[in-house]
Amino acid sequence: MTERVTDRFSDKERFTFPGYMERVTSGVGGESFLVFGGEKTALYDCGMAYSQAGLIRNIEEKITERGYGGLDYVLLSHTHYDHIGALPYIIKRWPSVKVCGAEKALKVFKSEGAAATMVKLGESARDRYAVSEEEKSCEITADGLRCDIVMHEGDTVDLGDMTVRAYETKGHTDCSLTYMLEPVMTMLASESTGVLRSDGKMYTAILKSFAQTIESAEKCRALKPKLIIGNHFGRIPDEVTEKYFDLYIEAATEERDFILAMKERGLSHIEMIKEYEKVYWTAERAKSQPKEAFYENANWIIKNMA
């Protein structure tokens, strides 16, 4: 991974948002942000299943404070367990909510194998990160997952005085979407273009295609967002915004070269995973990602890069 791009970020810096957005995250491992349009609300990602009760309370509190009638939309960045874990519980609480996601999400939500993986990793996260008895006793489920509005390149959702526009940004997954809030030009970035951590380092997760993830970064850079909200992070500091996607491309290229060098040395897949772990498994990462999930990702990253 790239060296630290700036000093360690404070939570105050990461979670200071414009008036139209609130952080409603509960627990650790996945972030959730609530967007308030002139007429409607939209939740960007749902976070982990084990902390769903706290997430729902946070959403209810913010909606009530601002005088909105309920939750209108859920915007899915992609279909991994740490981004949609609480979705079944959100749907149960607000049955009329419209879930927005990529076309591939329809297939994922019908897959028994994908559901089993979500439950397994969700249970691992619960056992690792749950603090309260409420969290520890949460039954992890993937039942009831759905996508009501399929978002393709350029498709929009109207929130009143604000429009949400979708962009396909593959590379991390085939269902990864980036959203732009217009006219304020705030980007809700997907994991295909990296995860900036509070230790100031850029992490990557190229589970599908290096070429696609670079294409996604270049697409997002060309959109010239005024503000970026990063997966697993929050508000990207202003001094990093203009160079954010360049930093990602640098980190992704470094990771690809590292993996290809191991292949040239003749290392086996297992040996490469062990070497990859030495470099990319960090104390900062452990704060929000179970090691089982890290290994799951490393397996696919190495396969698709090597």
Image: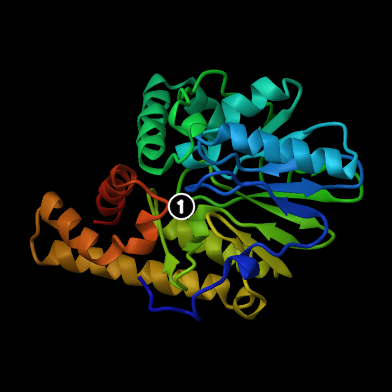
Q: Residue at (83%, 59%) from the top-left corner? A: 19
Q: Residue at (65%, 62%) from the top-left corner? A: 15
- The image shows residue 57, relative to residue 36, as above or below, that is above
Q: Is residue 140 visible to the viewer in this orientation of the structure?
A: yes
Foreground residue among 103 and 139: 139
Residue projecting furthest to the front: 133
- Horizontally, residue 231 falls left or right of residue 187, namely left
Foreground residue among 39 and 177: 39
Q: Residue at (38%, 62%) from the top-left corner? A: 284
Q: What kind of element bears circle 1?
A: loop
- The image shows residue 87, relative to residue 302, as above or below, that is above
- Horizontally, residue 78 falls left or right of residue 181, namely left
Quarter location, residue 58: top right
Q: Amino acid at mark 1?
A: Gly
Is the C terminus in the top left, top right, bottom left or bottom right quadrant? bottom left
Foreground residue among 269 and 69: 69
Is the N terminus in the top left, top right, bottom left or bottom right quadrant? bottom left
Residue that label 1 marks: 171
Q: Give coordinates of residue 261: x percent, y percent.
A: 19, 69
- The image shows residue 181, relative to residue 86, as above or below, that is below
Foreground residue among 297 and 129: 129
